[in-house]
Image: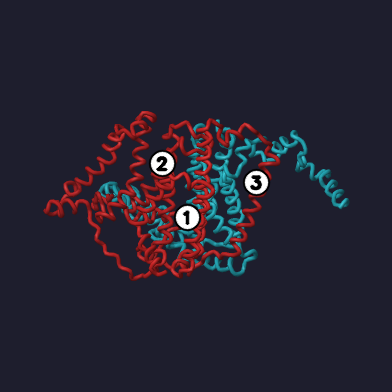
Chain colours: A red, B cyan
Amino acid sequence: MDALKSFINTLSYPWFSFTLSLVLFVAVVKLKKLWTHAGGWLMLALITVFFCGSMLDENFRSVVAKPDNVPIVMMVYLTGYFWWLAMYKGIKNDQAIEAGAPTFEKSESEDKVFTWPDLVFSELICMVVLTVGMVVWSIVLKAPLEEPANLSVAPNPSKAPWYFLGLQEMLVYFDPWMAGVVLPGLIIVGLMAIPYIDTNPKGNGYYTFKERKSEIFLFLFGYIVLWVQLIVIGTFLRGPNWNFFGPYEFWDINKIEPLVNIDLSEIIWIKLLGVGLPSHWLPREIFGIILMIGYFVVLPVAMSKMKYFKRFYDEMGGPRFYTGATLFLTMMLLPIKMYARWVFNLKYIVHIQEFFFNI
Amino acid sequence: MKQLQDLQKAIVKSQIWKSIFRVGIPTDNRKRALAMLGNVVLHLHPIKVKKSGLRMSYTWCMGGTAFFLFLVETITGLLLMFYYRPTVEYAYFDMVDLREVAAFGIMRELHRWAAHAMVIAVWLHMFRVFMTGSYKPPREFNWNVGVILLVLTLLLSFTGYLLPWDQLAVWAITVGSNMARATPLLGAEGPGAAFLTLGGEKLIHVGSDARFGLIAGRTIGGGTLIRFYVLHCLGIPFVAACLMAVHFWRVRKDGGISGPV
C-alpha cells in the first residue's frame, strides 16, 4: 500500500502528471469508446475508487475535506460528467449526420411546446431540488471561520480563493504581471473574441464533435487541462511555501526545494559562450527578446503558410487568423514555460529587472 | 375534501385573487399563452419553446441554476447585512455571532456555499454554451455579455471573501490583491511604471498605484473592508443585475434558446 502511495505521489509531480494529462487528454478525446455509457461508468468508477480509496489516507483527507475545498471536488465531478455528456451527445449526433439523419436536436426543434406547463414546472422542480440541496449542504457543512485577521502572522501556505488558484499556480512559472494581470486579462479578451474568430458556421445549436474538432479541442485544452487542472494542483497539491506535495504526502513546512533556476541569458552568455553577462540589459537579454519577437511576430506569419494552419488562414482571413494565433500562442506560452522550467530549469526567457519586465 | 375544494374555489373567485392573478390556472392554450403574458416574472419566457431546448441534457440547467443562486445570494446576503458591520472592530465578532447566536444560523453557510456553487454553475453554463456552439451568430454579443457576467461573478465572490475578516479572508485577499502591484504601467512594481514621471517625480508608487486604489491603502485594513463591502453588496450586484437583464432579453431577441437552424 505504501509503495502504491509513494508511486502515485511521484507520478503526481507536475512534470509527470502534466505530461500524463496531456497524453491522456489527447487519447481520451480521440477514443470514441470512452464517450459511451460503458465508458462513462468506467471513468466514474475509476475516479470514485481513487477518490474513496484515497480518503482512507490521513494526509489526503486533511486537505480534501477542508470545507472550502469540498466545492472543488464537486466541480471535478460535475466537469467530468458534463464533459462526458457533451461528447456523448456530440458523437451520437455525428453518427446521425453521417447516416444522413437529422441531429437529435433538429428532430425536436421543429416541435414547439407551451411554456406553461412544461418549462415552468421543470424550473419549479429545479428550484425546489436546488433549495433542498443547498439547505442540506449548509446544515451538514459549517462555513469555515479561522482566527481573527492578523496581518503580522501569515499562514503558510497563503492561498487565494480557490477559483483563482490556477492563476496562483501560474506564479510558479511567470511573474505577477503576467500570471496575475496580463494572462487573466487575455483569458477574458480571448473568451470574448471566440465568436468573432470562429468562422465555422457548423455546429450552431446542437452537440457535435466532428464538425468543430479544432475549436472543441482547443477550448477543452484551455478549460480542462489548463484551468481546471491547475486549480486542482493549486488546491490539493501545493503546500507550505507553495512547494509541491503528492496527494498522500504530509505538508511538511520544512521541505526544501533547491532553487536552481537560471535565466536564458545566463544559459547563453555564461554556459554556452563562456563569457560574463553584459552589464547593459539590451545585449544581455537580446536572445530572449529575439526569441519572443520570433514567437509572437514571425511564428504567426509562418503558421499562415504551414499546411496544417493554412486552411484556417484561408477560411478566416488575415485579421481573424492573426488575432486567433496571437491568443493561441499566448495560451501555449504557459505549457512551453512549464516544460522549459522542468527540462532546462529556465527561470526567465527575458529578464529585465530594471523595468520589472520579466517573461 | 369537498369543503376544501369549495374553499379553493372561493379563494380563486375572490376579488383579491382575481386582481393579482388575471388568468388563473391555465386549462386551454389561450390561457397558457395569457399566463405567460400577464405575469411579470413569467413573461421572461416566450409563450412556446422548442422541445429540444427543454431537455436538461441539452441545457444542463446551468444558466437557470446560476440565476437562481444569484437570487439565493441576494436574499441570504440581505439577511446577513442585518447583523454584519464592516469595520475592523466588529466584522469578525459579528461572524461569530452569526454562527452562534443568530436565528436561522445557516444563512452564512447558505451564502458561502451558494457563492461557490454559483461560480461552478457559471463556468458550466459557459462550457455548455461553447459545446453547443451557441455563441455563434446571432448570439455573439450575448456570449460577450456572458463573459462579463462570469468576471463579475468572480469579483462578487472575491470581494465577499474578505468580509469574514479572519485569517483565511485577509490572506486570500492579500495574495489576490498583490497581483495588482504588478499591473503594467499602473502598478508600482509593474513593467513600464518607472517611465511615468512628472518633473522627476514618480507618478506610480505604492501610495498611488492600482493596488492602492483596490485596497484603499498600503496594506489591507479598515479601508479595504468598507470598499469591498460596498462593492460586494451594492456596486457589483447592481452592474450584474443590469447585465443579466440584457443577457435574458438578448436570449429572447436572438431567437430564444439556441437550437439547430
Q: Earlier in the sequence, mark 3 or mark 2?
A: 3
Left or right relative to A187: residue A298: left
Distance from label 1 to label 2 (Cα)? Answer: 22 Å
Left or right relative to A115: residue B177: left
Please give the label number shown on residue A72.
none
Mark 2, chain letter? A
Which is closer to the viewer, label 1 or label 2?
Answer: 2
Mark 3, chain letter? A
Distance from label 3 to label 2 (Cα)? Answer: 32 Å
Q: Is residue A314 above or below residue A68?
A: above
Decide: few, some or many residues near mark 2? Use Cα within 10 Å; few <14, some 14-19, many ≥20: many
Q: Residue flagged by tag 3: what amino acid is it?
A: Glu
Where's residue A29, x and y in %? Answer: 43, 45
Where's residue B110, x and y in %? Answer: 59, 59
Q: Is residue B75 above or below residue B257?
A: below
Where's residue B158, x and y in %? Answer: 47, 55
Residue B22 visible in the displayed image: no
Please give the label number shown on residue A123.
3
Where's residue A269, x and y in %? Answer: 15, 51
Secondary structure beneath label 3: helix
Judging depth in this view, the residue of A270 and B59 nearest the camera is B59
Secondary structure beneath label 2: helix
- Give me the residue at 64% from left, 33% from top: A111
Pointers 1 and 3 in contact (CB under 8 A)? no
Which is closer to the viewer, label 1 or label 3?
Answer: 3
Q: Residue flagged by tag 2: what amino acid is it?
A: Gly
Left or right relative to B120: residue A198: left
Q: Residue flagged by tag 1: what amino acid is it?
A: Phe
Residue indicated by mark 1: B158
Residue indicated by mark 2: A190
Distance from label 1 to label 3 (Cα)? Answer: 29 Å
